[in-house]
Image: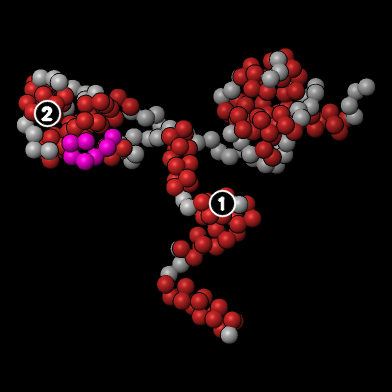
């Protein structure tokens, strides 16, 4: 038995919205089908509106395509504008970072009170290679950079430049999770509890207010209390 006309129309609308989101994300039908655990042919029937996507399938697609879930069923919910990012001039960035690290490497050597030859002996290389490192003519292997950093009480993390080199999504996520894990257990539980969102927003608002405004709020609260 064929679906009623309103249902058939809705299936086609949802199919169109999914297709728009898929193309915007640069995903193929095969990629989406494999993600859902179905065949590309089956996915095509859904996208063409001949059959309807299930809610769990749309939830999965929203995750894969990085769009709000409602944008896959509500034609009035516009997709967020795609971010147009300029290509990162990675080759030039690497050259710049090599020069910066050359200076930091030399600073580490000076801080440790070592000559170029002494640093060479420490790293098991020639003095000429140390000269090349410090002149920015040769990239410093990370293991040698780590040893040099340790000589002046630094770590590899101290030598990273998050402002110059854009972080990937995985690293950003890792840093976010690390910051969250660093919070005291009770505070972390409070932050993660959905019902506390309003209190967090109030705290964010208060943090942006001037001292005079905060003082007036405190005085008002005291008046109400007493």
Please check the rendered image and state whether residue 134 is part of the magenta-colored stretch, yes or no: no
Q: Secondary structure at mark 1?
A: helix
Asked if residue 175 is positioned above or below residue 58 in the image, the reply reads below
Is the residue 159 above or below the residue 2 in the image?
below
Disc 2, SS: helix
Residue drawn at (21%, 26%) of the image: 144
From the top left corner, tell me how far across and down residue 94 is, in percent.
Answer: 28, 27
On residue 18, the disc is: none
Spatial separation of the CA atoms under disc 2 and disc 1 = 48 Å
Q: Residue furthest front?
A: 185
* Residue 152 shown in magenta: yes
Q: Is residue 105 visible?
A: yes
Residue 164 image-quadrant placement: top left
What residue is drawn where x is 49% and y is 65%? 206
The residue under label 2 is 119
Task: Give coordinates of residue 52: x percent, y percent.
Answer: 79, 27
Local packing at callout 2 (Cα closer than 10 Å; few below 14, some 14-19, many 20+) is: many
Q: Sequence-wise, which precedes: disc 2 or disc 1?
A: 2
> Which residue does the image show at 90% across and 29% down from the upper left?
4
Q: Quadrant of the C terminus?
A: bottom right
Q: Which residue is painted at 62% across and 26% down in the image?
A: 22
Residue 146 left/right relative to 2: left
Give the magenta-colored segment's residue range: 150-156
Query: Mark 1 sits on what residue?
Result: 189
Residue 159 vertical placement versus 57 (above, below): below
The percent coordinates of residue 167 (x first, y second) are 40, 35
Badge 1 local density, few (<14 within 10 Å), some, or many (20+)? few
140 left or right of 204 in image: left
Residue 60: image location, x then y, percent: 66, 30
- Report the side of 28 relative to 147 (left or right): right
Residues under numbered marks 2 and 1 in contact, where contact means CB atoms less than 8 Å apart: no
């Amino acid at each position: 038995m064929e679906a009623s006309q309103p249902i058939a129309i809705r299936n086609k609308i949802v199919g169109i919205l999914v297709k728009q989101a898929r193309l915007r994300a640069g995903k193929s039908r095969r990629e989406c089908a494999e993600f859902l655990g179905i065949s590309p042919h089956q996915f095509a029937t859904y996208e063409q509106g001949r059959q309807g996507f299930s809610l769990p399938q749309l939830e999965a697609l929203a995750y894969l395509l990085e769009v709000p879930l409602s944008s896959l069923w509500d034609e009035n919910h516009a997709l967020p504008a795609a971010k147009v990012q300029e290509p990162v001039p990675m080759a030039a960035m690497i050259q710049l970072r090599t020069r910066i690290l050359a200076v930091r490497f030399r600073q580490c050597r000076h801080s440790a009170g070592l000559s170029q030859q002494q640093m060479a002996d420490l790293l098991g290389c020639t003095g000429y290679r140390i000269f090349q490192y410090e002149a920015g003519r040769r990239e410093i292997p990370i293991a040698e950079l780590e040893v040099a950093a340790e000589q002046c009480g630094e770590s590899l993390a101290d030598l990273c430049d998050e402002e110059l080199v854009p972080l990937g999504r995985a690293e950003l996520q890792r840093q976010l999770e690390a910051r969250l894990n660093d919070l005291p257990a009770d505070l972390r539980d409070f932050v993660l509890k959905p019902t506390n969102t309003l209190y967090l927003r109030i705290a964010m608002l208060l943090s942006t207010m001037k001292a005079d405004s905060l003082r007036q709020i405190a005085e008002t609260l005291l008046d109400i209390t007493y």
